[in-house]
Amino acid sequence: MMIKKILPLLALWMTTGAQAQVDTAAKASKPKIDLSGRSNDHFMIQLGALNWSGKPDTLTTAGFSKSLNIYLMLDFPFKTNPKLSMGFGPGIASDQIVFSKTHVGIKDNTTAIQFTDQSDTNHFKKTKMSTVYLEAPLEFRYSADPLTGKGLKLAFGLKIGTLMTAHTRNVKYEDKDNKTINDYVMKESSKRFFNKNRVSVMARVGLGHISVYGSYQLTALFKDGLGPVVKPFSVGITLSGL
């Protein structure tokens, strides 16, 4: 009777042990993905065309307004899926929007920044208003081939920035008939009218080290009541690598 009781227990133990060995062998035979040499897109350069949403019709922009961003990113792949990762890091982001025959009162002693059409009087031919931010993107990333960094890549997330400087650059002083009065450059700098911080949403898609990106600022460029309620956005090319 004792043997009859022991035999089923012994058979169950042997079956469980054999299954455990199979599972252990399967795990041991599963190849581990070595991500030590993967292309993590640590370094990113973005060049895009810039515009403002909510821009009043009275503002006359001209030429190529642009954004230029440079980021140094850390990349943290998911242990459960190496094709997915989170990217984070600091960078410098600059926006340059160009106006024609418009006085941009960045340093004027006014209650709000003024954009004054001066086409019918003496004026600067071109005025470029620039803002520079210390910025940190936070990206959720997908890479079809994480080992080589080639193939389809997707990313979306947020960018949080703080304003470092804001200035204008005015070139070639002309009369109302567009004749040059004085060919010189005048620069003015002030952050008084601008929001000190900004939050933007962004996304990019591409192949390998080249992708197309889009960015939209959620916060207004100017402080409440100190300027038009405009929000910069840009679309352009991202070069990434390392």
Image (cartoon, rainbow, N blue to C red):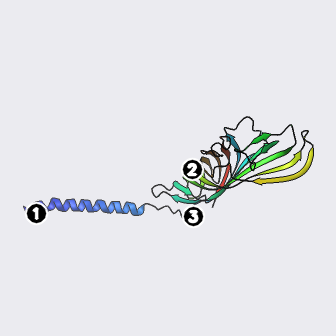
The spot of residue 120 in percent (x, y) is 86, 37
Q: The C terminus appears in which quarter of the rendering?
A: bottom right
Q: Which mark is residue 132?
A: none
Location of mark 1 (residue): 3
Location of mark 2 (residue): 158
- The amino acid on which the numbered mark 1 sits, given as a three-letter code, is Ile
Q: Which mark is residue 37?
A: 3
Q: In what element is the residue under mark 3?
A: loop
How packed is label 2: few (under 14 Cα within 10 Å), some, or many (20 or more)?
Answer: many
Looking at the picture, does residue 38 appear above or below residue 178?
below
Q: Which of marks 2 and 1 is in front?
A: 2
Asked whether disc 2 touches disc 1, contact meaning CB atoms under 8 Å apart, the reply is no
The numbered mark, 3 or 2, whose residue comes first in the sequence reads 3
Q: In what element is the residue under mark 2?
A: strand
Q: Residue at x 48, y 57 (%)?
A: 78
Residue 71 shows in the view: no
The spot of residue 230 in percent (x, y) is 66, 41
- The amino acid on which the numbered mark 3 sits, given as a three-letter code, is Gly
Q: Residue at x 40, y 64 (%)?
A: 28
Along the viewing direction, whichever of 111 and 123 lies nearer the viewer: 111
